[in-house]
Amino acid sequence: MRKLLAVFLSLVILSSLVAAQPYVTVFEGRVSTGQTVAVGNYTITVVQAADGSYYLMLRNGSRILELKPFAFGTEIERDGLKILIGSYTAQGGFIVVSVKPEFVTSLKPEVGAKAVFDGNVVRVTAVGNKTIDVSVNGVARTLEVNGSAIVDLIALEYDGKEIKVYAAEPASETVSMEYSVFYPYGKIRVSGPVDVPITITSASNSELSLSLQVTSMPEGWRASFLYGGVEIEEITLPPKGSVTISLHIEPAGSGTLRFSIGDFPGSVQIETAAVDVSIPYLSLDVEAGQKLTIPITFTGSGTVEFQPMDLPAGWTMYLTDGQYRLRSFTVSGTFSATLLIEIPRNATLGDHRLRFIVNGREYSLTVHVYKTYLGQPAKLTVILTDESGNPVKGWVSIGGKNVTTSAVGSVTVELSAGEYRITAGAPGAVPKEETVKLGDGEEKTLRITLTRAPYYFEAKLQNDVLTVTAGGSASTEITVTNLGSNGDEYRVTLEGLEPGWSYVISQDPNGATPIGTLKADPGESASAYLVVIAPFNVVSGEINAKLVITGKGTKVENPVTIKVENPATLSLNVDYPTLTVKAGGSTATTIWVDSMGTTVTNIKITTQAPSGWEVEAVPSSIPRLGLTRQGNVATIGGPKRVELRIKVPKSAPAGTYTITITATGDQAKAETVITVRVTQGSSSAYIGIVLLVVVFGIVIWLMRRVGRR
C-alpha cells in the first residue's frame, strides 16, 4: 500500500512540475491519535469520531481549515500546502505532506556556476544543447529545457535561460502524547560551538526509552547528544518524569541541523556571525619549488572554519598565524593570517587553481607555474663535523654507493628525486644515520655531526723496518693515541717470529724495563719500545712479522719487517800445511778454527782424503765460536784448536797427496788444503833396483837374438 501511495504521489508531483512550480515533500509517515505534525504555521493532527472513524484535521493556529476522513487517495491542497492521505492501520494513518518551496536564487547555465546556502551546494557540472547536468550536495541530476528536479528539500527549474533554485523547511516536530519535547531555540546566532538544552517529559506510567539521533547536518559540522557531559545515543525516562539533555553543535558556517528523539523530529537553524575574508591576489606567476605567503585579512565577529579543498599532487596549502596551523579560530574585529602554499619542484607547467572554504564559502587562487625542475637530478652535499664543529674526513653511504669525503669533510653526489637514508662515519666516530628528502633539481646541504666512539685508537711505529744482527737486538718506538671518549688500556704483542727469537715491550729502547700494557686517557698518547732479540744462529734474510695492539673492543695491526744481517765468517789456519810421512806411517798437525769475532754455531769439521787413508779431526765439532752473552755481559772467545790425525796405508805409493779440510757452521763455512808427501822405506828401494836390473838385462838379451836373425 505504501509503495502504491508513493507511486501515486510521484505522478501527482511530476504532473505539477510540468505545469508549475514544484512541490517538495517535507513529511512522510504515519500519524496516530494525539500526534501533531507542524509545517510552518500549520498543524496536522488525527482525531477520532464518536463512531470510531479517523479524520485528518488541518489547522492554522486555532482555526480549522480542513477536516477529512482517512480515505486512501484523498488529497488536500491549501495555501501552498498539499496533503495526500493514505490508509489508516493500527500504527496510525499514513500521510505525505508537501509544500511549495521558497525561491532562493537563480543560476546561469554555465559550467562551474554554483549556489551555496544553509550548508547546501548546487553546482552546474555540464551544459548541453537541450540538457544540463547539476550536482545538489553531491547528487547528480539532469535537467531538460522546461524541466525540473527535486533532491531532498531542494527543487530546481530550468527554462533554457536560467536555473531557479528553491528550498523548503521540513516539518519541524511531531509530538507524542506519551512524551513531550521542549527546546527553547529554533533559530540561533552563534560565533562558535553551542549547547542546546532539550527537556523530555514522559506522560507514561512506566519507563520510556527513546533513541537519540542527528539525522542531518551540513558538511564539516559536528554534533552529539550529551547527558552529564557524556555522549549518549539513547535516554530512559522515569515514569511521569522528565530529563534534560544537551545537543552539542560545532557548526562550520550557517545552516540547519535536524535531529530525532524517538519519533519526534526537531531542527535547529544556526546562523554564524558574519566574518569577511579579504584576499589581495587572484593569480600569481611562480617557479616550481617556491613557497608562497599570501596575506589574508578576516574582519568581523565570530568563528572561522578554514578547510582546504583538493590540491594537486605534492602541493601543500595551509593557513597560519606564524606560529600554528589554523583550522578553526574566532575573530573579533580584524585578524591577519598567512595562506602558505608550498609548490613542489616537480610541479607541471601551466595554471593550477587552488581552492579553500571559509565558513562554507569557497574561495580560489590561480597559481601559474612558468618554470619547473621535473625530472632533473638533485645535488646533495654532505658535510661531516665533530662535536666541536671541526671538519672530519670520513665516508658516506647513500643510494647504494659508498663515497669518501674530502679532507674538509664534504662530498657532493647527484641523485634522483626521492627519500634516502644516509649513513656516515669516520675513523674513531660512531656511524650516524640521517634521512633526507630530495626534490627534482633540488640542491641541498646536509650537515652531520659525528660523535667519538667510546673506544678507538691509532697506533704508529717510528720504524716499521728493523735491522738486527745475529745475537743482537733492534728497537723501535710505539705510539698509541686514544681517539675514543673513554680511557683505555692496550696490550701489545708481536706475531710471526721464528723459533729462537724473542721480544720485549719496554719503557726504554734497550729492553731493560719491560711493561705489560699501555694506558691512555681520551685524547692522550702513550709510548713504549718494541725490542726484538735475534738468536745467535740466525741466518741472513727477512722476517715479516705483525705488531698487534689490542684495546677494549678494538684492535690495530701494523706490519713489521725484520731484516737479519749475519756477517759471520770462519777461518782455518794450519800449523803445518805440508807434511811428510812414510807409507804405512802416521802424522798429525794442528788446525785453528776462528770466527774473527763473529758468532758461528754448530761447526762441523769434515775431511776429504785419498782412498784408504785414515783422517780424523779431533774434535770433529765445535758448538759455538765468537760472541757469548750472559745476561747483559757479552764475551768474545778466541779460536779453537783442532788436531788433524792422518794415517797413510802401507800400499800407498810414494808421492805427493792433498787433504781438504772443511769447517761448516750455521752461519759460515771455511775450507783449507794440506799437502802430504809419502816416501818408501830402504829395503824396498834395493828390491826395486834389482828388479830394474833384471828387467834391463832381459830387454838387452831379446834385442841381441832378434838382431842375429
Image (tube, rainbow, N blue to C red):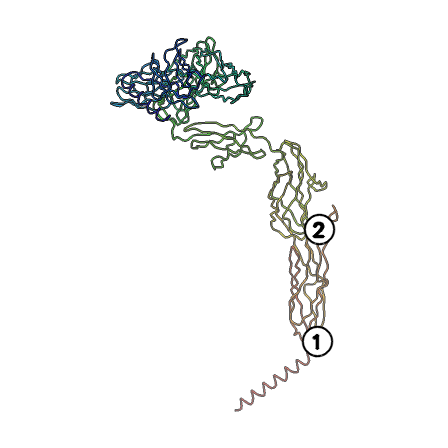
Reply above or below: 487 against 652.
above
Q: Which residue is mark 2?
A: 627
Q: Position of residue 607 (x, y in %)?
A: 66, 65
Q: Judge by depth and name the residue closer to the eye, 443 or 575.
A: 443
Closest to the camera, between mark 2 and mark 1, is 2
State yes or no: discs 2 and 1 in contact (Cβ < 8 Å).
no
- Residue 144, located in which quarter of the rendered image? top left
- Residue 673, located in which quarter of the rendered image? bottom right
Reply above or below: 468 against 671.
above
Reply above or below: 452 against 164.
below
Q: Which residue is mark 1?
A: 681
Badge 1: residue crowd in 10 Å (few <14, some 14–19, many ≥20): few
Q: Quadrant of the N terminus?
A: top left
State the SS at label 2.
strand
Going from N to C along the chain, the mark reached first, 2 or 1, is 2
Q: Position of residue 395 (x, y in %)?
A: 52, 34
Residue furthest to the front in view is 51
For image coordinates 46% across by 27% down, the residue present is: 444
Q: Judge by depth and name the residue closer to the eye, 224 or 615.
A: 224
Q: Position of residue 394 (x, y in %)?
A: 53, 34
Q: Looking at the picture, which amino acid does disc 2 mark? A: Leu
Please count the marks in the image: 2
Q: What mark, if any, has residue 666 been given in the picture?
A: none
Badge 2: residue crowd in 10 Å (few <14, some 14–19, many ≥20): some
Q: Looking at the picture, which amino acid does disc 1 mark? A: Gly
